[in-house]
């Protein structure tokens, strides 16, 4: 390759920032995103000198690097204030005053961008809405979340105290959540004393085939949204003949309303490491990646510390606990792109390319990251693995219902008294979960619930008896998605929520395929017309057009983002009869 | 003594002329397309299977010489049992597949894809796209006039070709041609995200400052006229471009020993554009700056000199 570099020469500072992450590792393209992060963290933007230096060191064509930087919302090619506050204006925060917060910041600090603050889609802190994440660049960069956020609160980094996690997990106990807020997440011995690593010990004892047998017997279904049987996936990767195999923990959690993976990583990081390690042993992988979204600074620190301690304690690395087996984990940080949670987009992101999904087939178990067989599992899925090995697959399968086994985490937020992560055995109804969270705030009337996040569906208060199982939601033409339960009381301006959802998909589409790239824009425009009353033709014509936009996105888009971009909107019109009344809300 | 005469004995004469070992049989797959049975090589795409029996499938981002990116989605077909439609251009056939190329879902998807493109992009120099829009009944006006489009000023920054991204459907063909599928220059890539995604040079610099070597292979594959010879662009601007008065003549490039086939597009005895046929072994449609743009010397009225770049 004869590359043409013409950027300005990098300063000593720029080179030092980049060299700090590249060190003497082989200069592969997959280090592109870590190197870009290094520049962003140091200067608050990716300076031309740093970018040119990165391209030279990694032999990346500058035009492609430009394409990669401009793909991610947390990377900037323009000078930006060194400290940037990302303020969530997404669904759960909207109903808790996010717009007021944005107005106040605009007044005090100046306009979005140059004022040192920016709007952001859901930051995964919905139980403490309204939320903000502050990212400070410099020689000693720092990042922290502030929630609930206010114009004053964002100025100082809150104290870190793990018992504060109890606020996010209002009910004590549980099979998956029992350590959170109670066992120090930075302590390996604390983890071991509370039953940690019993699953991995057993896995080493019984060997890969038996581990996969247990996972299959447990009938565990993926918790990332697609509900695919985990045992089948593990088996396919273990059997694939190409080598090496990889394990990826999908911690990109960006579905609006979802925060369970963050709470697990912040509050019980060793459990995630243990789950990944067992997955590695079972599928014959020696290398794992944890792909964590860029807006999770505390989870990132906790996971990095846990990986470090596990390595020091002989629970990661060569010859795990004298078993002769090896497994290690590398963390990769996302940079502000919901689409990178889609597994094939995630592969491209790790490989240093734009996070554009690939067409399937081939499936990840045949050709995943670096073209090799890859297992991708959600954080919650992996946290269930040690439990399955401790209990045995058969016993685990007795928890819950026959088609939805095990414990399940739900992210309850919006207008409820005690928002947070709730663990129940599969089978609980929607009404029971809302009751657990203390019911609707202030005893108001429930108007609607968004199930499964922005990619999910709205249901009305007539659906409270729906069992929140895979089969129960399917029967009601709803979805569990990532376990989101976002409640709205009868004072909510649902039209405004719909506009926000449409804007989310418009902003987060990768732009690759026509149905989604243009469809998400046309859908948003049409909803604005409905709201303003400036219709083209009559209401029936507009609604017919909306349905056709939805259908082509569902039928012809490459990936799940486009395929579900109309689902919440359409369900609001049918289930909530939003436009059936005398006039559209305005 | 060991009888080693074996070593000196000539091998027996073959009783028949030796033949090469048989090639492994290419697996064949049978499937049905619109109710018609068809048998094709297992490595075929649905598009190839359809073409083999004369079923036409529209394509915009697909080109024989490029790796399929399957992004335009105009080629989608319905496969029985599949949850969503599949792109014919890249999906491989499977035994027993039942394919519908004209179901109501397929028709709606194609109509909407063209409606989306026609409502957001200037298709005036994209005859193929305009034909699809007509064929599938796209009505872009349904989306109104106050809508987002990719409208932007045309980029004229060198003497050889112009880039009018208001006409770009983002089919990725130029990026592939500039990259590993042909040129390996990597001067352009997709930048930005979502509806704001655009084809861009590094840092969006003008072409003369970029890595571009002016092979023009991107122009050769662009289906919309977003990339256009400067000569064609100027003639269109002044209203003198007239394809009905143009002739095409194939010749061999005289610059070097590779011997690329050139197709000269001639109007009023002047070369107005140079292409190369996709199906010629030597070039597969690709040329270099000399063959593509170095034609001015042919014209007997020497035009005033200008440097090729900028
Ligand atoms: C647009 C989009 C975003 C996604 N985001 C996530 C995510 O943040 N976390 C996740 O675990 N899965 C996400 N998924 C699902 C993954 O593609 C994949 O199915 C999942 O990680 C598999 O893990 P599981 O089998 O354990 O559920 C997303 C899918 C789509 C289409
Ligand atoms: S559906 Fe949307 S997000 Fe997915 S590949 Fe297409 S444009 Fe990208
Ligand atoms: S002319 Fe050649 S080098 Fe320049 S952008 Fe086009 S394909 Fe790339
Ligand atoms: S410039 Fe032409 S070839 Fe390139 S993406 Fe746009 S339409 Fe396709
Ligand atoms: S953090 Fe604001 S909506 Fe989730
Ligand atoms: S031709 Fe198949 S997706 Fe474009």
Image (tube, rainbow, N blue to C red):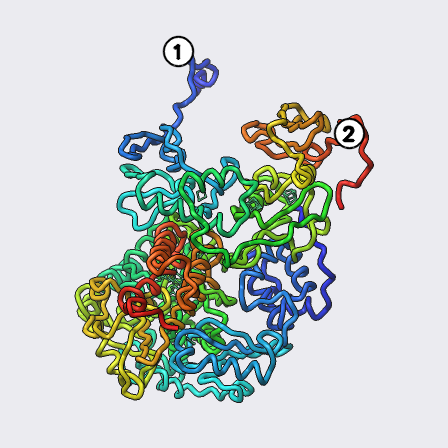
Q: Is residue A305 above or below residue B220?
A: below
Q: Nearer the viewer, residue B101 or A419?
A: B101
Q: How many labels, in total?
A: 2
Q: Chain of mark 2?
A: B
Mark-to-mark CA distance, 1 and 2: 61 Å
What secondary structure is found at the residue carrying circle 1? loop
Ligand 6 image-quadrant field: top left
Residue B18 seen in render: yes
Horizontally, residue A40 falls left or right of residue A283, namely right
Residue A247's label in the rendered image is none
Q: Are marks 1 and 2 on the same chain?
A: yes
Which quadrant of the view contains residue A16?
Answer: bottom right
Horizontally, residue A320 falls left or right of residue A12, namely left
Q: Where does the image place residue B215, in percent across and percent down from the top left?
A: 66, 39
Screen quadrant of the N terminus of chain B? top left
Residue plotted at (50% across, 37% down): B128
Q: Where does the image place residue B113, in percent across and percent down from the top left?
A: 43, 48
Horizontally, residue A465 falls left or right of residue B10, namely left
Q: Does ligand 6 reach within 8 Å of label 1's beta carbon?
A: no
Please rate how many residues cluster around mark 1, counting C-alpha atoms within 10 Å: few if below 14, some from 14 to 19, many from 20: few
Q: Chain of mark 1?
A: B
Residue plotted at (35% across, 53% down): A548
Residue plotted at (63% across, 23% down): B249
Residue B297's label in the rendered image is 2
Residue B16's label in the rendered image is 1
Residue A270 seen in render: no
Q: Nearer the viewer, mark 1 or mark 2?
A: 2
- In the rendered structure, which disc, 1 or 2, sits on the residue that comes first in sequence? 1
Q: Nearer the viewer, residue B265 or A117?
A: B265
């Amino acid at each position: 390759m004869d590359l043409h570099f013409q950027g300005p020469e990098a300063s000593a500072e720029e080179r030092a920032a980049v060299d700090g992450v590249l060190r003497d590792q082989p200069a592969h393209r997959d280090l592109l995103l870590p190197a870009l992060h290094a520049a962003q963290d140091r200067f608050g933007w990716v300076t031309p000198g740093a970018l040119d230096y990165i391209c030279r060191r990694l032999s990346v064509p500058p035009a492609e690097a430009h394409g990669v930087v401009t793909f991610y919302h947390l990377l900037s090619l323009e000078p930006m204030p060194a400290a940037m506050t990302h303020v969530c204006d997404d669904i759960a925060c909207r109903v808790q005053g996010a717009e007021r917060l944005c107005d106040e910041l605009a007044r005090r600090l100046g306009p979005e961008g140059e004022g040192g603050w920016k709007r952001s889609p859901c930051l995964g802190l919905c139980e403490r809405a309204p939320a903000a994440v502050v990212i400070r660049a410099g020689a000693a960069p720092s990042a922290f979340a502030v929630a609930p956020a206010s114009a004053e609160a964002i100025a100082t980094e809150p104290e870190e105290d793990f018992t504060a996690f109890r606020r996010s997990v209002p009910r004590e106990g549980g099979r998956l959540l029992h350590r959170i807020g109670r066992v120090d997440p930075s302590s390996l011995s604390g983890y071991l004393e509370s039953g940690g690593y019993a699953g991995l010990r057993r896995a080493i004892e019984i060997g890969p085939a038996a581990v996969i047998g247990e996972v299959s017997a447990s009938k565990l279904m993926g918790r990332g949204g697609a509900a695919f049987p985990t045992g089948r996936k593990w088996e396919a990767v273990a059997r694939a003949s190409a080598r090496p195999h990889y394990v990826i923990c999908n911690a990109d959690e960006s579905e609006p309303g979802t925060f369970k993976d963050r709470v697990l990583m912040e509050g019980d990081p060793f459990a995630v490491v243990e789950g990944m390690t067992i997955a590695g042993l079972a599928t014959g992988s020696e290398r794992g990646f944890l792909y964590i979204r860029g807006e999770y600074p505390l989870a990132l620190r906790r996971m990095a510390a846990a990986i470090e301690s596990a390595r020091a304690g002989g629970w990661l690395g060569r010859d795990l606990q004298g078993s002769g087996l090896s497994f290690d984990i590398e963390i990769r940080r996302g940079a502000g792109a919901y689409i990178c949670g889609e597994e094939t987009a995630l592969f491209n992101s790790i490989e240093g390319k734009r996070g554009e999904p690939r067409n399937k087939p081939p499936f990840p178990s045949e050709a995943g990251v670096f073209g090799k067989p890859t297992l991708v599992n959600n954080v919650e899925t992996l946290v269930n693995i040690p439990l399955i090995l401790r209990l045995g697959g058969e016993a685990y399968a007795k928890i819950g219902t026959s088609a939805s086994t095990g414990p399940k985490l739900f992210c309850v937020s919006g207008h409820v008294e005690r928002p947070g992560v709730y663990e129940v055995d599969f089978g609980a109804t929607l009404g029971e979960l809302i009751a657990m969270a203390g019911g609707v705030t202030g005893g108001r009337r429930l108007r609607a619930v968004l199930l499964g996040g922005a990619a999910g569906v709205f249901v009305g208060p007539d659906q409270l008896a729906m069992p929140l199982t895979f089969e129960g939601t399917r029967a009601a033409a709803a979805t569990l998605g990532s376990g989101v339960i976002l409640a709205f009381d009868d004072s909510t301006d649902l039209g405004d929520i719909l506009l926000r959802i449409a804007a989310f998909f418009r902003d987060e589409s990768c732009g690759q395929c026509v149905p989604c790239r243009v469809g998400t824009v046309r859908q948003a425009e049409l909803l604005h017309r409905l709201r303003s009353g400036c219709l083209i033709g009559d209401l029936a014509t507009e609604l017919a057009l909306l349905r056709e936009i939805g259908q082509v996105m569902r039928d012809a888009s490459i990936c799940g983002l486009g395929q579900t971009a109309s689902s919440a909107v359409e369900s609001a019109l049918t289930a909530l009869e939003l436009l059936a009344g005398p006039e559209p809300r305005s | 003594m060991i009888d080693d005469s074996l070593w000196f004995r000539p091998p027996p004469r073959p009783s028949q002329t030796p033949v090469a070992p048989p090639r492994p049989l290419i697996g064949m797959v049978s499937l049905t397309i619109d109710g018609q049975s068809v048998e094709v090589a297992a490595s075929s795409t649905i598009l190839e299977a359809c073409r083999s029996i004369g079923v036409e499938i529209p394509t915009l981002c697909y080109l024989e010489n490029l790796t399929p990116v399957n992004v335009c989605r105009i080629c989608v077909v319905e496969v029985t049992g599949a949850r969503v439609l599949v792109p014919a251009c890249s999906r491989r056939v499977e035994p027993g597949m039942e394919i519908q190329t004209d179901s109501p879902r397929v028709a709606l998807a194609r109509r909407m894809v063209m409606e989306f493109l026609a409502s957001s992009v200037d298709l005036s120099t994209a005859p193929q796209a305009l034909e699809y829009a007509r064929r599938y009944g796209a009505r872009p006006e349904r989306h109104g006039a106050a809508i987002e489009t990719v409208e932007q000023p045309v980029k004229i920054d060198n003497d050889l070709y112009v880039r009018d991204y208001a006409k770009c459907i983002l089919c990725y063909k130029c990026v592939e041609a500039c990259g590993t599928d042909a040129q390996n220059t990597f001067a352009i890539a997709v930048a930005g995200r979502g509806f704001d995604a655009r084809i861009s040079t590094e840092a969006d610099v003008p072409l003369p400052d970029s890595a571009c070597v002016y092979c023009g292979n991107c122009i050769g594959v662009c289906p919309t006229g977003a990339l256009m010879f400067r000569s064609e662009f100027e003639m269109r601007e002044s209203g003198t471009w007239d394809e009905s008065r143009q002739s095409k003549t194939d010749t061999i490039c005289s610059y070097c020993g590779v011997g690329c086939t050139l197709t000269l597009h001639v109007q009023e005895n002047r070369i107005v554009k140079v292409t190369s046929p996709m199906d010629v072994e030597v070039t597969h449609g690709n040329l270099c700056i000399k063959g593509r743009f170095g034609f001015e010397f042919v014209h007997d009225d020497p035009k005033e000199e200008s440097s090729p770049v900028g």
